[in-house]
Structure formats: C-alpha cells, structure tokens
Image (spheres, rainbow, N blue to C red):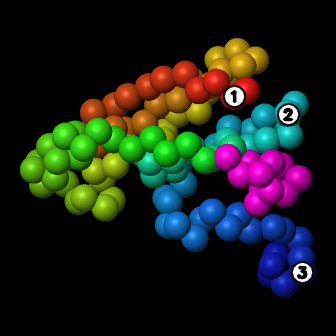
Amino acid sequence: DLLLSNSCIPFLGSTEGLDFRTLLLDEERGRLLVGAKDHIFLLNLVDVNKNVKKIYWPAAKEKVELCKLAGKDAHTECANFIRVLQPYNRTHVYVCGTGAFHPLCGYLELG
C-alpha cells in the first residue's frame, strides 16, 4: 500500500539480501546507520538511495571456517551480523558484530 501511494522510498541496497539487524538514527545530521550481514550502511534520511555509503566488514575467514566446522549454517550463522550501533561521541560510533561466533567491536569514524 505504501508503494502504491508513493508514501515511501524503498532502499535499493536491500536487493543484496543482507539481513538487516540494527538501526541508529542521527537526526542532527540527517542520516541513518543500518547494521546488516557483513555490512554497515550510512543512509541519507531525505532519500535513502542517494549517496549511500557502505562498509564491508566480514568475519575473518578462519572464524567462518571454525563456525562451519562447529556445524553452523554458512549462510545464516557464519558471518559478521552487526548487532550494536551506539553513539560514542560527535565523530565516532561504537560498532559490534557477531564475527561468526567470535564477537568483534570497533569505533567507526563518521567523517
């Protein structure tokens, strides 16, 4: 219904099948951070498809292999699912992912 009424703009990046997990709204700067499978997106709130910035942050290959050897599903469990997007200060966001069952965190400079 929303598409038919032109009430929304679908995010075209979702065609990659990226299993979105977490969001962080930055109203002050007019952007939305989206955590997904192996990716972090920085979107413009006015038009989510304009000037999309994407960071590819996969789990280490050896961690993915260990995950598969433990009997986990390679496509749905053995990846870096971004779970935490937390403001740290005016220039950085604290980011954590599952890292194929070996969690990893870092600071993302928003620039």
Pointer 3 or 1: first along the chain = 3
Circle 1 residue: 110
Mark 3 or 1: the one toward you:
1
User: Which x, y percent locates residue 20?
Assistant: 54, 54
Instruction: Estimate the x, y position of residue 58 in percent, counting from the top left.
Output: 39, 44
User: Quadrant location of the N terminus?
Assistant: bottom right
Estimate the spatial distance between the alpha carbons at disc 3 and disc 2, rounded to whole Å.
28 Å
Magenta part of the chain? 43-53
- What residue is pinned by disc 2? 29
| Quarter in which the C terminus is drawn | top right
Q: Quadrant of residue 50?
A: bottom right
Mark pair 2, 1: CA separation: 11 Å
Q: Residue at x 81, y 79 (%)?
A: 3
Q: Residue at x 83, y 49 (%)?
A: 45
- The reply to whether the C-beta atoms of the residues labelled 2 and 1 are less than 8 Å apart is yes
Identify residue for label 3: 5
Q: Is residue 93 left or right of residue 17?
A: right
